[in-house]
């Protein structure tokens, strides 16, 4: 009988290992701490600390974005896939040490206006 907690074949453990390698070998830079305001949109307040991995590159030619939660472990709990219709782009953002409540807050934050996001959770059985 299949284990419902087992990683589905299409969610490769190689993907998570590669993401963990990037996090382990990069400096995490938090440029928008929890509770801070967006630099261009002062009404937008970050519910969880937000930053990037120094020395990496995402679609916007900046570092790979990370949301850093309150858990001690910096293990990746999932990735967010986002579309920004204003900028007409898509990005992948890593969730590090986020609780389920923080994940919900981030999704609510990102699913406003011309932004849309989904969470691809990392199953507990494949977390480090």
Image (cartoon, grey):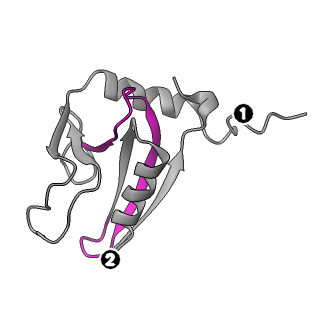
Label 2 Cα neighbours within 10 Å, binned few <14 / some 14-19 / many ≥20: few
Q: What residue is disc 2 on? A: 114
Whether label 2 touches label 1, CB < 8 Å: no
Assign a secondary structure to mark 2. loop
Is-magenta flag for residue 73? yes
**Which residue is drawn at the image coordinates 41% and 41% (left, top)?**
98
The one nearer the camera, 88 or 38, is: 38
**Residue 24: horizontal and vertical position, in percent?**
32, 22
The residue closer to the viewer here, 22 or 96, is: 96
Helix, strand or loop for disc 1? loop
Residue 103: percent from left, percent from top? 43, 51
Mark linked to residue 81:
none
Q: Is residue 117 left or right of residue 62?
A: right
* In the foreground, 117 or 58: 117
Q: Residue at x 49, y 54 (%)?
A: 119
Quarter assignment of residue 110: bottom left
């Amino acid at each position: 009988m299949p284990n419902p907690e087992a990683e589905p074949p299409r969610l490769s453990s190689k993907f998570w290992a590669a993401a963990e390698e990037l996090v382990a070998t990069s400096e995490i830079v938090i440029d928008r701490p929890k509770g801070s305001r967006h630099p261009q949109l002062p009404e937008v307040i970050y519910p969880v600390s937000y930053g990037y991995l120094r020395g990496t590159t995402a679609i916007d030619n900046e570092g790979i974005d990370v949301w850093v939660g309150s858990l001690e472990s910096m293990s990746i709990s999932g990735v967010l896939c986002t579309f920004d219709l204003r900028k007409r782009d898509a990005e992948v953002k890593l969730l590090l040490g986020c609780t389920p409540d923080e994940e919900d807050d981030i999704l609510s934050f990102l699913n406003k206006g011309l932004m849309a996001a989904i969470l691809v959770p990392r199953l507990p059985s494949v977390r480090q």
